Image (cartoon, helix red, strand yellow):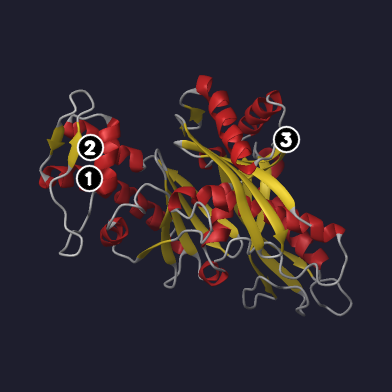
C-alpha cells in the first residue's frame, strides 16, 4: 500500500518542501518539491520574520502543484541552530533467567542514560534518542546486543533536543495555514544516516554541511550524533567577500564563486572571471589572481574553523575516521574538496544521496529529512503489523546508498 508524506526543511538560504510516495520496501519517489529562497536565520533568529510565512506558503504550494496533492499534514525539520546534542553512558543489570539481553534491557539502559542527563531540566524537547553503541560486560561494542549473554549491559546514548520556541512558532504558523504538524525531526540526524554507511559510522565519521550562512559540524557514531556544533561561516561569506573586494553586486559575486576553479589544469583551465554589469550591461573582467586571493582567504578562514572543531572532538575520532562534506557551500565548487583537504591536512570526501531527483549536495538536508520521515513511519507501522517478514527490509533504503 502506497503512502504519501510531506516534509519541510528550513535551510539558511532556502525552504524546501518535499512530497514523497512509498510503494513498498526499498522504494520511494519524490513526487513534488518546492524550493523557495528566503532570508534564513542567524544566531537562532529569523533574519526577516515578516517574510517567513509567505516563503513557507510558496514552498508548500510549489510542492503541491508538482505533486498534484494537497498537503494537509507535514513533518518539520528543526534547523541546526535550534537543536542541541547531549550524550551519556549508562549500565543496567541483565535480569533475564538465561542472562541474555532483551529489548527491555535496551530500553532500560537508554532510560538510564536519559536520567543521567536529567533531560527534564535541559529546557528542550527531545526529538531523537539514538544509541552510539552497546556493550555486554564491557566487551566489544555492538549495535545489536539483544540475545547476547552477560551480567551487565552498557550503552552510549545521544539525545537531540529542539528549541521549544521554534516548535511553538512554526506550529502556530502552519496551523494558521490549515496544515497540521505530524512531528519535528532533525535533518542533521537524517542526512547523517542517509549519507554515511553503517561501516563509516561504526568507524566514527565527521560530517560537515557547509550551508550559505553557517556550517554544521557533526560527529556520527553508530546511529547517533555524538557531537554537534554550528560554525558561524558558510558559502555566503565567500560570496560577500568577493562582492566587497570586486565592488560588484552579490548576484554577480555568486556567479563568479560558482564558476571558480581552485586548481585549474590543462583539462580544466581557468581564465580571468567575467560577469555582466546589471546596470550598464557591460561585461566586466577581473584578474584571476585578484579573485583567487579573495576566495582562498575566505575558504582558509572557514577551514580554520573546521580544523578547530576537529581538534575539539579529536578524542571521539579514530585513526580510521573519515571526514565528509555536503551542502552547497564548497562541495559544488570545482576543486573545493581537494583544496579543503589540503588546508585540513587530511582526506575529505563529498557525500550526497543517490536519489533519482534532487541528487545534489544542496538538497542533502531535505532528502535526509524525508528519509528519516519514512523510517519513522516504517517503525510505527512495524509495531502495528505482525505479519511475518514485515520487520525485514524497512524503508531505510528508500534512497539507494
The earlier-in-sequence mark between 1 and 2 is 2
Q: Nearer the viewer, residue 13 or 189?
A: 13
Which callout, 2 or 3, points to the residue nearer the camera?
A: 3
Tell me residue 61's x, y (percent).
60, 32
Residue marked by disc 1? 295
Tell me residue 310's x, y (percent).
39, 57
Find residue 233 and report its image quarter: top left
Which residue is pictured at 71% across the width and 41% down the height?
A: 120
Is residue 226 toward the left or the right of residue 282 in the image?
A: right
Q: Nearer the viewer, residue 306 or 243?
A: 243
| Visible residue check, residue 78 | no
Mark 1 burial class by Cα count in 10 Å: few <14, some 14-19, many 20+: many
Tell me residue 68's x, y (percent).
66, 40
Which residue is pictured at 81% across the width and 70% down the height?
A: 102
| Visible residue check, residue 104 | yes
**Cα–Cα span, label 1 and label 3:** 44 Å
Tell me residue 364's x, y (percent).
50, 52
Q: Which mark is residue 72?
A: 3
Which residue is pictured at 38% across the width and 57% down the height?
A: 311
The earlier-in-sequence mark between 2 and 3 is 3
**Cα–Cα span, label 2 and label 3:** 43 Å
The earlier-in-sequence mark between 1 and 3 is 3
> Which type of secondary structure does the marked residue at label 3 adopt?
loop
Residue marked by disc 2? 242
Question: Pointer 1 and pointer 3: residues touching (CB < 8 Å)?
Answer: no
Amino acid at each position: 500500500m502506497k503512502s504519501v508524506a510531506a516534509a519541510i526543511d528550513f535551510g539558511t538560504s532556502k525552504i524546501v518542501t518535499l512530497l514523497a510516495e512509498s510503494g513498498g520496501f526499498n522504494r520511494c519517489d519524490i513526487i513534488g518539491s518546492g524550493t523557495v529562497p528566503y532570508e534564513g536565520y542567524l544566531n537562532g533568529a529569523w533574519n526577516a520574520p515578516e517574510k517567513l510565512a509567505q516563503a513557507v506558503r510558496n514552498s508548500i504550494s510549489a510542492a503541491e502543484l508538482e505533486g498534484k496533492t494537497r498537503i494537509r499534514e507535514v513533518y518539520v525539520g528543526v534547523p541546526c541552530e535550534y537543536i542541541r546534542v547531549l550524550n551519556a553512558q549508562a549500565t543496567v543489570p541483565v535480569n533475564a533467567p538465561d542472562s541474555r539481553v532483551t529489548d527491555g534491557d535496551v530500553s532500560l539502559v537508554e532510560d538510564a542514560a536519559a536520567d543521567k542527563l536529567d533531560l527534564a531540566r535541559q529546557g528542550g524537547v527531545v526529538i531523537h534518542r539514538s544509541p552510539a553503541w552497546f556493550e555486554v560486560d564491557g566487551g566489544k561494542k555492538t549495535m545489536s546486543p539483544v540475545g547476547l549473554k552477560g551480567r551487565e549491559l552498557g550503552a552510549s546514548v545521544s539525545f537531540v533536543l529542539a528549541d521549544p520556541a521554534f516548535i511553538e512558532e512554526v506550529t502556530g504558523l502552519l496551523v494558521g495555514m490549515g496544515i497540521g504538524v505530524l512531528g519535528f525531526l532533525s535533518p542533521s540526524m537524517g542526512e547523517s544516516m542517509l549519507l554515511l554507511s553503517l561501516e563509516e559510522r561504526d568507524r566514527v565519521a565527521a560530517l560537515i554541511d557547509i550551508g550559505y550562512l553557517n556550517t554544521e559540524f557533526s560527529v556520527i557514531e553508530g546511529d547517533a550524533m555524538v557531537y554537534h556544533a554550528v560554525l558561524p561561516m558558510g558559502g555566503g561569506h565567500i560570496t560577500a567577500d568577493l562582492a566587497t573586494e570586486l565592488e560588484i553586486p552579490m548576484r554577480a559575486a555568486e556567479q563568479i564563486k560558482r564558476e571558480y576553479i581552485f586548481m585549474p589544469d590543462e583539462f580544466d583551465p581557468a581564465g580571468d572571471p567575467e560577469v555582466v554589469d546589471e546596470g550598464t550591461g557591460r561585461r566586466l573582467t577581473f584578474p584571476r589572481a585578484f579573485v583567487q586571493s579573495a576566495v582562498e582567504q575566505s575558504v582558509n578562514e572557514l577551514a580554520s574553523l573546521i580544523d578547530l572543531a576537529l581538534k575539539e572532538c579529536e578524542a571521539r575520532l579514530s585513526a580510521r575516521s573519515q571526514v565528509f562534506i555536503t551542502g552547497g557551500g564548497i562541495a559544488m565548487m570545482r576543486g573545493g574538496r581537494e583544496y579543503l583537504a589540503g588546508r585540513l591536512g587530511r582526506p575529505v570526501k563529498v557525500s550526497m544521496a543517490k536519489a533519482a531527483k534532487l541528487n545534489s549536495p544542496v538538497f542533502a538536508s531535505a532528502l535526509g529529512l524525508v528519509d528519516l520521515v519514512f523510517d519513522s513511519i516504517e517503525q510505527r507501522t512495524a509495531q502495528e503489523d505482525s505479519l511475518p517478514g514485515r520487520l525485514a527490509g524497512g524503508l531505510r533504503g528508500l534512497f539507494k546508498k
